[in-house]
Amino acid sequence: MGKAGNLRQRLSSYFADFASLHPRTQRMVTTASSVDWVIVGSDTEALALEYSWIKEFDPRFNVRFRDDKSYPYLAVTTGEKFPRVGVVREAKKSGTRYFGPFAQAWAIRATLEQVTKVFGVRTCRDGVFRRAQQTQRACLLGYIDRCSAPCVDRISEDDYRDLVDDLCSFMAGDIDSFIKDLKKRMEAAAAHQEYEEAGRLRDRLGALVSVAERNAVVLNDGMDADLVAIADADLDMVVQVFHVRAGRIVGERSIVVEKSEDLELSGYMFRVLQKLYAETAPGSVGRPPKEVLVTDTPADVDQVIEWLSELRGAKVDVRVPQRGEKATLLDRARINAEAALLRHHAHRSADLSTRGKALEELRDFLDLGDAPLRIECIDISTLQGSNTVASIVVFEDGLPRKNEYRTMVIRTPHADDLASMREVVTRRYSRTADSDQSEDSLHDANIESEIGAARRFSYDVALLVVDGGAPQVQVAQQTLLDIGRNDLPVVGLAKRLEEVWVPGEPDPVILPRTSEGLYLLQRIRDEAHRVAISFHRKRRTKASKVSALDSIPGLGPSKAKSLIKHFGSVGKIRAASIEELATAPGIGPKMAVVVKNALVSNVSKESSEQEASGD
């Protein structure tokens, strides 16, 4: 479901060469049975109609939003004769004004307790209110002056309406004027020796100050804006929203977005703004503010501005702030979004039922006999064929077993990615093919644990994942057959489209983007990549320390190691004077001069090469 100014151009993008389409688009085209369209008068109408239909029909190929929790709002039923205030989590209703959302329920309940002390707006249910009207007996809150008790005609309808309007103004951000007014009235009562009244006003002033402190001041210019930040991942993202009114944060929320559509970040930002401000959406925040500050400019930004301005009844500015306080605050929202994304992923990883579901999905999608309780993943890391290394990470029951991670140095000279994969599979799995091998044969000087010395592998692997596509999978499968391991399933996970390749199949297995099984495979692959990159960088750094000294005539390996051990790094050796170099064990005054001149010459040569490459 979507909108387009040029229908022919939009549809032709779906009916291009099938092989060139994104897998999500391929699934959509093969699933659809017909095409229908509606002509509207403007882009703004198309925008509103598109979102209303998305909410009504919930199409599987559009972006799916789901909050990571249900957010509470402070609701004032302004449409009633005697409005009430309360905490709700329900969808928006007409005739009710909402403030929030609040991140924690305790915070909004504490706010409600304080504001009712000051404004005396009722919090009772309609049934309790009608019963009090019939019996002409106020409830406990009325007797202790926590409610103005309109149920027993203690206050007129007009005066009660003024209290409700004051409460709404206060919650909308007009805080300072109320605090100043209460402070002035308190001082006046004290000056007239009306100490009981002054004490009552003092308590109300303290309540308002408590609420004001809970809503942190963010700007000095009376800012009226929503800040929308995105933290992006491959399968999902988190949107963090700060609601700022009159220079204060009056609410915030985070939304988990499952990436079902093939969109850029600008496209997802477009969908997010639709979600936030569509009046019929359950998560809508209602009327847009003066400014909507975003981390990424939404697609069709002019249409979005026109639509939001129409909803507000005044101009709305949608932009990415580049500097100043607003940019700083938006960056804070982005940091919160990244933290929420990490919490979301950690929750998925730690949840036992989620891990079980992921393993069951892998069993079903990959046609395995049992759920793969132990999964190992191989990743190769190299830099133009030098210092090629590999990592093997282990996940058991969906969780990493870091004490069983391994890294390997590739022995095959000038090995490409496929040759490296063949060597790693041979060295790793030939060890477990023969159960009669001795303990000593299981150790290898070139296999290192991420946390220290090599250890024997535990129970056998149930699924091997390789980082790559069909070629890497075929090589891994053939190598396993060559060493007699025809019982070990192999799959490959390609980075670009997150396709799962199975040996002997011409087409990949496409797991749903919301699949817990795909998320687990992706996490395992990313962890293997992290370990391989870290090990490769460590070896490259170690090699570079020695290579800078290798070309110095007369400086053998033992003297080079002596210099490294004495100074700690090549950079410190370069910075040392000839006299300081001569103090290193085995380095005399003559060799110190040779080393100094050679290092200075190398620095000059490197600078010349960099200038030449820059030209």
Image (spheres, rainbow, N blue to C red):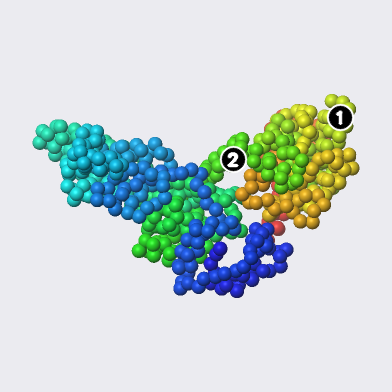
Q: Earlier in the sequence, mark 2 or mark 1?
A: 2
Give the labeled residue for mark 2: 348
Q: x, y percentage for residue 306? A: 43, 66
Identify the secondary structure beneath mark 2.
Answer: helix
Tag 1: Cα neighbours inside 10 Å, few (<14), some, or many (≥20)?
few
Viewer can see residue 474: yes
Q: Is residue 560 above or below residue 417?
A: above
Report the quarter where the C terminus lies: bottom right
Residue to which mark 1 is pinned: 435
Q: Nearer the viewer, residue 222 or 505?
A: 505
Residue at 39% from the left image edge and 65% from the top image edge:
310
Q: Is 170 situated left or right of 293 in this image? A: left
- Would you say 247 lies left or right of 28 here? left
Residue 289 falls left or right of residue 80: right
Please give left or right for residue 302 compared with residue 140 in the image.
right
Instruction: Give me the residue at 34% from left, 47% from top.
Output: 75
Crowding at mark 2 (Cα within 10 Å: few <14, some 14-19, many 20+): some
Residue 595, image x and y in percent? 75, 39
Q: CA distance from mark 2 to mark 1?
A: 37 Å
